[in-house]
Image (spheres, rainbow, N blue to C red):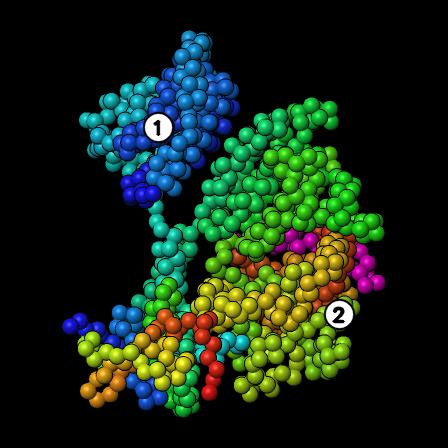
Amino acid sequence: MASQQYCTFYLDGLFFGVEVMKVQEVIRYQEMTRVPLASDVVRGLINLRGQIVSALDLRRRLNLNDRPKDQLPMNVVVRAGESVVSLLVDEIGDVLEASEDDFEQPPETLAKGAREMVHGVYKLPRQLLLILDTERAVNLENTPIERR
Amino acid sequence: MESPDDLVKEFLVESYENLDRLDQEFVKLEKNPTDRETLSSIFRTIHTVKGTSGFFGFDKLGSVTHNGENLLSRLRDGEIALVPEITSALLSLVDAIRKMLCNIENTGNEGNDDYSKLVETLSRLNSSSSNANQIKAGSSNPAKPDTANADVHQPIAMAPISAPSTIPNQNSTTSEPKSATHDVDQPLPANSAVQLPPTIPALHADEKSGGLQEQSKSSGISESNIRVDVALLDKLMNLVGELVLARNQILQFTATQEDGSFVTASQQLNLITTELQEGVMKTRMQPIGNIWNKFPRVVRDLASTCGKQVRLEMEGAETELDKTIIEAIKDPLTHVVRNCVDHGIETSAVRVARGKPAEGRVFMRAFHEGGQVNIEISDDGSGIDSEKIKQKALQRGLITTEQASRMTERELIGIIFMPGFSTAEQITSVSGRGVGMDVVKTNIERIGGTVDIQTKAGIGSTLKIKIPLTLAIIPALIVTSGGDRFAIPQVSLLELVRLEKNEAREGLENIHGAPVYRLRGKLLPLVDLNRELNIKNEDESAQADSECTNIVVLRADERQFGLIVDKINDTEEIVVKPLGKQLKGISVFAGATIMGDGKVALILDVMGIAQRANVISGVKDRALNEQQVQIASENRETLLLFGVGREGRMAIPLSMVSRLEEFPFSKIEKTGDMEVVQYRGQIMPLARLSKLLQMEDSAIAQDTSDLLKVVVYSSQGRCLGLIVDKIIDIVEENLTVKCQSTRKGVRGSAVVQGRVTEFLDVENIISNFTASEATAVGV
């Protein structure tokens, strides 16, 4: 059976994965310039070797609780279409290989906002790996999410 | 539909380039019908197109070009003479080729148009071997001075060049026609080319230095140039920008190091990076001639359509501009040139009756000045009749009778930039549809340029366009608000006002909750950046500084407003970078930039802020009134008033001043006899005005703690500081010299604010100053 490689990370206790081919790089916390008037998902702009990249707070995007103030996020820089966007996550995990045998659609009971951005779930031995739909996650136009 | 493969694409690109050159050459040829060099070049181009089209199986293209080639070969050999009929036929041949190429590009085939008529004309002209002998006899002599005129160095340079380049690749197809040309019209070089082979090595060595340079200048476009994808250049430019930042960090680090070889290495890195940056910037620059090339043809065609005689002259075609700007001004310029020919220049009969030469003249000039590119397009035609404009504008309901009676001459002429205006009596295919000058103006303003027109009825008009050198890098004012830095493009910046605590309390007033400030007697609406952007000041130290109020006076769509910011930092050249699509909806930001310390700063969109703060209202009538006020105030000039010597009161136009600075006397250093100060990484010479003008020197500081007031004037990248005694005020006045001056360095005097004030002749002062000190400056 075919298998896929995923770059994994943690968000508020949940275990997420993004297809390895979509990840450009993973970098530690970068100083950001806030953008007034922008959606509160956009935490700021970072300078990625001369390219200006928007940093999206994935916790806010997925309607999770805000990260404690003293915890600095990591950047998972992903390519989405033409643009490059940084996703702010709590912690970086390993690159995992998951086989399609363990794949399943996300349960209907998942909160509506989050469900749209989760492709599916891999049932790993110890925990569940939620696969993030990066294209949807970085597109702020269609799914304005009410904050809890 | 099949997309052409790479080879066909190459062919198309090359042919388009050649065709563009053809247009120019035909016009040149018409003036100078016996110029063999031009004829040969045209022949070569057509020949190449024919050859390649045969190779790709474009038969129609092949047959059309074949007939053209036949005709051209006889022209070149002097068997028939170039008459206007032939020129027209050849030009329509070029058009036909262009059309077919266009079809090939879009659909992959030549299209279904019928060119049999063109083929027929070409072959008919070809068969009419009329005055062949006569031409042949006459041509050899007159041709020589002509070619000599056109390219003085070329015939001389050609021989050595073509020899080495031809012989190594004798098999290449392009070199064959070239040597053939020499056989025909230049017996001497051709002979020497024949004799050359045995002596090649020696000659090659000799010519390496001089000859090869000539080659790149005159002949070898294809040999010395390669095509590069613009996207690649952009990427290089980004990377170089990053390199510069990394270099800056290393240089800062170097300062704390003592290892000599490390310091040397980083200095080396510093120099190379700077040079690399300049080089990469240059790659994006293109001469404006690239778009001017097509104007001779435009003018020729249009003039013959209108039945006028028009000569186009150009100056400064080598002036370089960023590629994106070149693209942006292409259409506006074409429009202006067409306007000149269609509206400006009169018919020959009218011109003669008015005592002008029968042939009209359109003159295009481009030059660099003050970090901007100036383009002037003038004609010696009928000029713009303000009375006629008034009538038309009234007729079209653009202005009311009451408004018209109040408008000055200059304001009336400004109407031509209003949407929906045209002076043409009739709508022709050429112009008169009323979409014109307003589009020109909007397009130029979109890229941060300005348009101005000067005209005299009966004598002609001049359109002056000023545009920035590049779009990618813009000068900007950096301000701090709410603890973050923001960049404001300098094009929209008018002035800066700083109110101390007391002044702020008195100066800032409210009209029903809308804060305003009286700026020289006029009400200036104020916008608080912190409030507009919903940001709070997190930085405590900045709060303490907020005892004084900083107002950045901006212009948005002919309206002025003041933006209140926490702190004004400095001006800087910034590289504009786009924002991600997550932020596209926010109209108050035009982009972002990376500052010297590597952090990101947002660029404010002045229009966006004005709209958000409701500074700009949508009411049209009001906009028109504002526009008139604007025009009226353009007649006036903003003057900087300052004191020189004990009593002297002088003024210079504020536009000539780049900054006002204060330097403590202790900062002044001396090189030779001259006083200088280190200023923004440059050594700025200082001139004591009172000394230069031989006025009694007065209170100017001698004490080390005193501050010297300096008016900084900069031109062509060099600065000069004029030391004055005090800065008095900035006023708006009509700059009319009432009384001419006999003193050197003074243009004259007038009454400003009720007191006699002298106008300083800055240019004179500077040329005198730099002439006498130039050796000392050594810049």
Q: Is residue B52 above or below residue A51?
A: above
Q: For residue A29, what is the image quadrant? A: bottom left
In the rendered image, residue B168, in percent from the top left (x then y), is placed at 21, 33
In the rendered image, residue B148, in percent from the top left (x then y), is placed at 44, 25
Q: Identify the residue position indicated by label 2 in the image.
A: B523
In the rendered image, residue B495, in percent from the top left (x then y), is placed at 65, 66
Any part of residue B195 in sight: yes
Q: Earlier in the sequence, mark 1 or mark 2?
A: 1
Q: Which mark is residue B60?
A: 1
- Quarter of the image with the N terminus of chain A is bottom left
- Marks 1 and 2 sit apart, C-alpha to C-alpha, by 70 Å
Task: Identify which residue, B740 or B214, lies in the foreground.
Answer: B214
Which amino acid, mark 1?
Lys
Q: Is residue B772 magenta?
A: yes
Direction from residue B371 to residue B110 in the image, left or right: left
- The residue drawn where x is 39% and y is 19% is B71
Q: Which residues are magenta?
A: B750-775
- Determine the chain carrying the residue at label 1: B
Q: Is residue B210 above or below residue B559?
A: above
Task: Identify which residue, B90 or B701, lies in the foreground.
Answer: B90
Q: Is residue B752 magenta?
A: yes
Instruction: Give the class, few, some or many, for how many residues have Cα within 10 Å of label 1's Cα (few <14, many ≥20).
Output: many
- The residue drawn where x is 65% and y is 60% is B557
Q: For residue B166, what is the image quadrant? A: top left
- The residue drawn where x is 43% and y is 11% is B128
Nearer the observer: mark 1 or 2; the answer is: 1
Q: Is residue B763 above or below residue B272?
A: above
In the rendered image, residue B270, in percent from the top left (x then y), is placed at 37, 65
